[in-house]
Structure formats: structure tokens, C-alpha cells
Image (cartoon, helix red, strand yellow):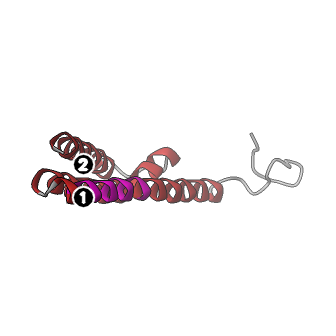
Amino acid sequence: MVIAGVLCMCAAVASAGFGTWSLSRPAVVDTSALALRALAPTQLAAAIMLAAGGVVALAASPQTALVVVIVCVAGALGTLGAGSWQSARFALRTAAAGAPACAGSCAVCTQTCH
């Protein structure tokens, strides 16, 4: 369980680092940067779950630690998956709101279509 605990702690540090990096970047209008910034809270939540699993793996009995590590890793992966889904939906909605209203029909639109 020592290996699982160390791996969980390393994954927690990596996830927290990426989440902090995403939050420290300046706010821009770029869709991909917006999606990364929206994903930061879920990365930090996953880091907390992984850290908790790592601590339990290092401190608890092997039977208890195994169950807790599985639950923490599954929870962290589920959180990241749901956060990625919501972040992508948010970025697509934001990008679609800024798109021209002509939707390719330049004859009825006064804006320049590309």
C-alpha cells in the first residue's frame, strides 16, 4: 500500500499544480483558455480526494486502505470526467454566443461571414 499511497500523493500534487496554474493564468476570451480555467476547481477537488486516499493508504490497515484508495481514485476520476464535460459545454456555449448570427447565410447578414 506504500506504493499506492505514494502514487496517490504524486497524482494529488500534479492535479493541484495544474489547477493552480490554470487559475493563475490571466483571464482571456480564448475558448480553450476559458475551458482550462473552468476546469481548475475540479482539478483541485480531485487533488484533495487523491491526497486523502494517499494519506489513508500510508496510515491505515491494508484492507481498509485498499477500499479507501479505490473509492478516492474512482471519485477523483469521476470528478475530473464530470468537470471536463461541464467545462467543454461551457466553452462551447460561450463560443456559440460570440458567433455571427448569419450562420453561413451571408445574403441576409450584414456581418462578414468566414
Q: Is residue 53 above or below residue 104?
A: below
Q: Is residue 15 above or below residue 53?
A: above
Tell me the SS state at disc 1. helix
Labelled disc at residue 48:
1
> Around disc 1, counting alpha carbons within 10 Å, would you say few (fewer than 14), some (14 to 19), or many (20 or more)?
some
> Around disc 2, counting alpha carbons within 10 Å, would you say few (fewer than 14), some (14 to 19), or many (20 or more)?
many
Tell me the SS state at disc 2. helix
User: Looking at the image, which is closer to me, 7 or 113?
Assistant: 7
Furthest residue toward right: 107
User: Looking at the image, which is closer to me, 107 or 14?
Assistant: 14
What residue sits 52% from the left and 48% below the top?
Answer: 31
| Relative to 74, 110 lies left or right | right
Q: Position of residue 4 (x, y in %)?
A: 22, 43
Tell me which amino acid carries mark 1.
Ile
Residues in magenta, as a range: 65-78
Q: Is residue 44 visible?
A: yes
Spatial CA distance of label 1 from label 2 is: 7 Å
Report if residue 73 lies within the magenta region.
yes
What residue sits 22% from the left and 56% below the top?
Answer: 63
- Mark 2 and mark 1 in contact (Cβ < 8 Å)? yes
Labelled disc at residue 29:
none
Helix, strand or loop for the magenta stretch, by majority: helix
Q: Position of residue 66 (x, y in %)?
A: 26, 53
Q: Is residue 49 visible?
A: no
User: Looking at the image, which is closer to me, 17 or 75?
Assistant: 75
Tell me which amino acid carries mark 2.
Ala
Mark 2 highlights which residue?
12
